Amino acid sequence: MDPDEVESCKDGFFQHLAQTVPGRKELVVTEARGCTIKSADGRLFLDFISGIAVANVGHSHPKVVQAVQDQMARYAHVNVYGRFALPPQVEIASRLTRVAPGGLNTAYLTSTGTEAIEGSLKLARKYTGRKGFVAFERGFHGRTLGSLSISWKAQYREPFEPLLENVDFVPFGDLDAAGEVVNHDTAAVIVEPIQGEGGVRVPNDDFLPGLRQICTDRGALLIADEVQGAMGRAGKWFSFELWDIVPDIVVLAKALGGGLPLGAFLATGEIFSTFLDPPLSHLTTFGGNPVSCAAAVAAFDIIEGEDLLAASEEKGAELKRRLETTMAQFPEYISDVRGQGLWLAIDLPPDLTMPIVKEMERRGVIVGSMLNSDGTVRIAPPLVVAEAELDVFIGVLRASLLAVRSGKL
Ligand code: PMP
């Protein structure tokens, strides 16, 4: 693109696309491969947020590209989800249910995370005949009305009220508080086993087993929102596998589609049978789009074939150690390092977070802030990240912190 085309693209974005954050965009993206994003002016950036937990196998992995081209040449959309048996849908559902534990043998495919959450809420209400939901402080589940109702931040919810009634928020990690509100009208407790937008918060080891027990005792379903945490992000297929629990419903999206839009919610066939009464209780046009499913199958096979679960755990542990060393060198700026696998975060003084994020971008590394945790910076590179790319990231982080220390920012 020549400089005029670049400026006209920025103008066009500003004029014709709905703006949800103020300000004209600084970068026009022309390519992305592996961990690298290329801008129209020829600059290269390391993507250390994976397009927000999507590019787990890297951007435009050749095997995903091939699978998409092959499926597109066969067919893309043929009918509303569930009308015909489509091989790519069967393939991805079989793979997911093969790696999912204990009886989670059935998948409903959607297009996005929030849509899969909506489906899971409907399923929980229909199956239990109850209305209420229990969710957690700092939790995030999406922006459509049902998902918004169970997402914590009042600032995002209140302008859109009235939302779903009968939703209680309790502190993440607090079993006593959960025990007080889960009752005979609770359809489900919905939890991110590791909170993403809440700041990559890993709970104490007794929290999820305790929550499982409370749900079982009171007849409520346990929904694990794995939209951000699945597909190797935390070193496992699903982050809840870090504890000895099996949720009743598991919700996925983001990395599932290998870069294409695909979501899913998994449960037992017995729970899903409620969607047959009456028939067509739940439907979507594009859910489980065959091209997205083909991309998902390729991404799944890459995660297995390139051993990316182990890579996430090992590289994540190494990166965490290096972040802890950086924290020791800059104790006045970094107050915490958290996370699991290649799903990490650091806490900075809130007023310095955006200046540091911007300085890192200027130096060629993309990181980002979080919706529900002021001052937290997300660090979640593709699971295929190379050792040398981790070196560049740490170098850029330190250089940016040194720029703050020397008063240059
Ligand atoms: N749940 C969680 C935990 C998420 O992080 C997100 C998106 N950030 C969603 C649900 C919503 O997913 P989507 O943006 O695909 O609707």
Image (tube, rainbow, N blue to C red):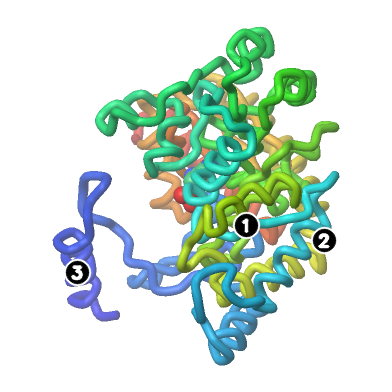
Count of numbered marks: 3
Mark 1 and mark 2: Cα distance apart in space: 26 Å
Q: Amino acid at mark 1?
A: Tyr
Residue hosting label 3 = 7
Q: Say which of 258 and 191 sits in front.
A: 191
Residue drawn at (69%, 61%) of the image: 384
Between marks 3 and 1 in the image, the one whose residue lies nearer the viewer: 1
Q: Quadrant of residue 192?
A: top right
Residue 315 in sight in this render: no
Residue hosting label 1 = 108
* Label 2: which secondary element: loop
Q: Amino acid at mark 3?
A: Glu
Image quarter hosting the C terminus: top left
Vertical position of residue 42 compared to residue 159: above or below: below
Residue 7 in sight in this render: yes
Residue drawn at (37%, 44%) of the image: 358
Left or right, 276 with respect to 284, comes to right
Are there few (<14), some (14-19), or many (20+) residues within 10 Å of tag 1?
many
Are there few (<14), some (14-19), or many (20+) residues within 10 Å of tag 2?
some
